[in-house]
Every structure is written in C-alpha cells, then in structure tokens.
Image (cartoon, helix red, strand yellow):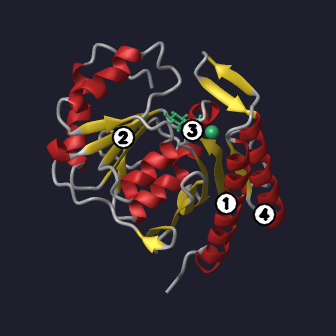
Amino acid sequence: MQTDPWHNDLDHYLDIAQDLARQAGALIKDQWLTTKTVEIKTDMVDLVTNVDKAADALITEALHTRLPDHQVLAEESALSGPDSPYRWYIDPLDGTTNFAHTFPHFAVSVGLTYESQPIVGVVYDPIRNELFCARRGSGASLNGSPIRVSSTPSLDRSLLLTGFPYDRRQRSHFYLSFYQAFMLRTQGIRRSGSAALDLCYTACGRADGFWEWRLYPWDSAAGALIVEEAGGRMSDFGGQTFELTGDQLLASNGKIHQALIEVLQHVLSTSSERSGA
Ligand code: IPD
Ligand code: CA
Ligand code: CA
C-alpha cells in the first residue's frame, strides 16, 4: 500500500508546531498587559502590534532553521523559503484587536499543508493555556484529550460564531444581513474576535457552527483541520469544498450544516448587494 510522503514525519511536524505555538504564546502572554506599539494597517480596524511581529519572527525563523526545505507564509512577513509541496501558514497572533485592548481572547495558529491539503494544525490560547491539535487522519485534541464536535441537531438549538471582515465599514448592511438571519433562527451568536479559536470552539463543541467572509489561509489552515478531525464539516456557503484561499468559510458539527447553507443561500439570493467576491 502506498503511503503519503508526509506520513512518517507527521509526529515530528506536530511536535515542532506545538513547540513553536507554545513559545510564541509565552511571548504574547508576557506582553499582553504592557504598552504595545499599535499600527493601523487599513481603515482604523486592521491592527498590528510589535508583539504580532515578534511572534511572527520567532516562528518563521525557527521553521526555516528546523525545516529548511519547507515554505512559510506568515501573516506579518512575505512568503519565504524554497519552492516546496510543504507550506506552513502562520497567524502569529489571531485576535490582535482583542490583544491590543487587553481583551483576553487570542491565539497563535500554526498550520502545515502538503500540496494545499492541511496535515497538521495547532492553535494555542496562552491565556487559558489551551492547546488544540490535529494530525490528518488521527483525530483532534485539547491539551491531550480527544475532542468532538457537538451533537446539537438543529439550528434553533444552536450557538453560532462569526466574525466580520476588514471591509465591514463599507459593507455593513451586507454582512449584518447574515447576522440578522441567524439571530432569528438560533439560540445565540458570538463574535469572539479570533477566527482560529472560533474553529477550535466549533471543534470541541463549545459552539455548533461558524461562518465568516474573507478570512486568510493563516486564519484557517490549522483550525479547519482541527474541525474536520473532530468530526465536523467544512465547506463554502454553498456546500462546496472549503478552500484555504476561498472567501467563504463555513464550519459546523455536520448535523446543522445543511440548515446553515440554506440560510446563507437564502440571504445571498435576497440581498440587494452582491458578495463582491
Ligand atoms: C482576525 C480575527 C477575527 C476575524 C478577522 C481576522 P487578526 O485576525 O481572526 O476574528 O474576524 O477576519 O482577520 O487580524 O486578529 O489576526
Ligand atoms: Ca487572523
Ligand atoms: Ca494575526
């Protein structure tokens, strides 16, 4: 039987991902109550701090030293390393707005893909000391214990998560039309400010589903694998294959997935505004 080329190295890659997520998490936790340098990338709502950059450099440099044949795409640096089927997607600090305001909900996200297929995912919340991990084909865990998605059977019993993209000031009506539709059909919606943790919370059953427009691959590479390995489902808003570079992310416990798609499609078909994708 032919095995995937990454198969024998998966434990090694997972160890590296965990180690670097913890190291970056320690750096972030150390700094979160200190005064940070906050820069605005776009439109007053897209922020970056000196700590995002320091965590980015820590992970990127360590990956190049430990795996010089691999490519790395980290949010705060350019694509680096040689051409390779292996690419790491790094969000050194997911939840920067929370972090900048000392709101204690943010994470480090470290994902590895082989030919665009996620094979390792690690998300670390340094405040709660929660480490979410997945290896392709081996399930997902939280601090070493296996996790599963919820068994919530229907939308009217569900708790959902969402986030709003950086063009939200220009397109607030459009994004809020989805929020309103789910507000009328669920037990609640939370906007946590960290997409990586939204995926992990869906994976471990703290929420039943998560939708968001226009995330980047570094937001979702690790978390998407964690959802799937925890028994959940990932797709776009029409139920098609979820692509890391696509502009629609839908995650759920599987049981409510079709109902989520129906609401999303209904809003899309009745919205006067186009997706702009
Ligand atoms: C953001 C967070 C947020 C989501 C945004 C992301 P950042 O990432 O994940 O929850 O709504 O779309 O860009 O900028 O804090 O790394
Ligand atoms: Ca992010
Ligand atoms: Ca970030």
* Residue 218 lies in quadrant: top right
Q: Which mark is residue 161?
A: 2
Reading the image, the residue beneath label 4 is: 69
Q: The disc labelled 4 sits on which kind of residue?
A: Asp
> How many residues crowd around disc 4 within 10 Å: few (fewer than 14), some, or many (20 or more)?
some
Answer yes or no: disc 3 within 8 Å of ligand 1.
Answer: yes
CA gap between label 3 and label 1 equals 16 Å
Pointers 1 and 4 in contact (CB under 8 A)? no
Nearer-N-terminus badge (4/2): 4
CA gap between label 3 and label 2 equals 14 Å
CA gap between label 1 and label 2 equals 25 Å
Reading the image, the residue beneath label 1 is: 22
Q: Secondary structure at mark 3?
A: loop
Nearer-N-terminus badge (3/2): 3
Reading the image, the residue beneath label 3 is: 95
Q: Secondary structure at mark 4?
A: loop
Against 24, is 18 above or below? below
Q: Nearer the viewer, mark 3 or mark 4?
A: 3
> How many residues crowd around disc 2 within 10 Å: few (fewer than 14), some, or many (20 or more)?
many
x, y (%) of residue 118?
A: 53, 59
Nearer-N-terminus badge (3/4): 4
Q: Nearer the viewer, residue 9 or 102?
A: 102
x, y (%) of residue 242?
A: 41, 48
Pointers 3 and 1 in contact (CB under 8 A)? no
* Residue 189 lies in quadrant: top left
Q: Nearer the viewer, mark 4 or mark 2?
A: 2
Q: The disc labelled 2 sits on which kind of residue?
A: Leu
The C terminus, quarter of image? top left
Against 125, is 120 above or below? below
Q: The disc labelled 1 sits on which kind of residue?
A: Arg
CA gap between label 4 and label 2 equals 37 Å
**Where on the image, by quarter, is ligand 3?**
top right
